[in-house]
Structure formats: structure tokens, C-alpha cells
Amino acid sequence: MSPREIIFYETDFGDEPVEGFLAGLEPAVRAKVVRTLEFLRTQQIVPAKFWKKLSGSDLWEVRVEYAGNIYRVLATFAKNNRVILLHAFQKKSQKTPRQDMEIALQRQQRYFQRHGYL
């Protein structure tokens, strides 16, 4: 199986919100997120500790913990084994906040409107 392609969602204005979020992280945290994304890109089977489908949606989350803090990158699958990184945030509660889910779902819808799924 070929590796997954990791794509940063791009807004209509050319911004990449997930990349912007990562750029604002401390270097050690950013490095761990990047290592986790590389693991996702290259490994066919990824443990749920790092990559998990969110119940009740077709979104997935990249899961990163560092120094007691929890970070999430919400993503979706697209054609040709692509993973589209839609939204990133630092998690402060047990459940993924609805607002963060909504942002990711809106970006997912916009991505598929522009690029199609198949």
C-alpha cells in the first residue's frame, strides 16, 4: 500500500489554518505533531492513540499529547489516499468541542465542493 498523502486545507484566500496553528506552537510540541503526521503518512496501521475516527461523523483526529497538554488535528479522507488536515486546536476538555467539530465540518464541505471526493 502506498503512503498516505497529507494535505493542509487551504481557505479560499490561500491561508492554511492548520499550518498556522502548528507554527504558533512551541518547537518541541510542533516537532511531536510533525512526527505523528509522518507516522500517519507512512504507516498502514496507526494505533488509536495517534489516529482515531470521531464517533457520529466521518472526521478523524490526529492525537498528540505533550507535557500534559493535549492537541488535536481534525482531518478527513479524500480520493487517492489523501488525508486533509482541516482544523487544529489544544484540547481542554474530555469531549471534542462542538465548535471545533463545526469548523472542521465546514472546511470539509468546502474542500469537497472545490475538489470533489472521487
Image (cartoon, grey):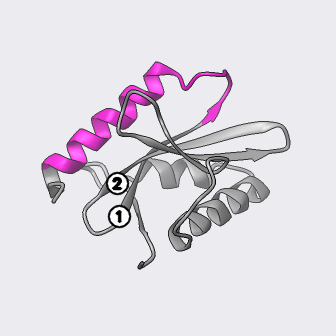
User: What residue sits 39% from the left and 27% below the top?
Assistant: 56
User: Which quadrant, please, contains the N terminus?
Assistant: bottom left
Q: Position of residue 73 (x, y in %)?
A: 53, 45
Magenta segment includes 106: yes
> Which is more toward the observer, 40 or 103?
40
**Residue position marked by numbered label 2 in the rendering:** 77
Q: Residue at x 38, y 36 (%)?
A: 104
Q: Nearer the viewer, residue 82 or 104?
A: 82
Q: How many marks?
A: 2
**Quick one: SS at disc 2?**
strand
Q: Earlier in the sequence, mark 1 or mark 2?
A: 2
Q: Residue furthest bottom?
A: 2
Q: Which residues are drawn in magenta? A: 90-113
Tell me what residue is drawn at x 34 percent, y 54 percent. Answer: 77
Horizontally, is 78 left or right of 87 in the view? left
Note whether 97 is above or below 32 in the view shown.
above
Q: For numbered disc 1, what is the local secondary structure?
A: strand
Sort mark 1 into few (<14), some (14-19) or many (20+) by Cα contacts within 10 Å. Answer: some
Q: Which residue is mark 1?
A: 82
Q: In the figure, residue 31 lies in which quadrant?
A: bottom right
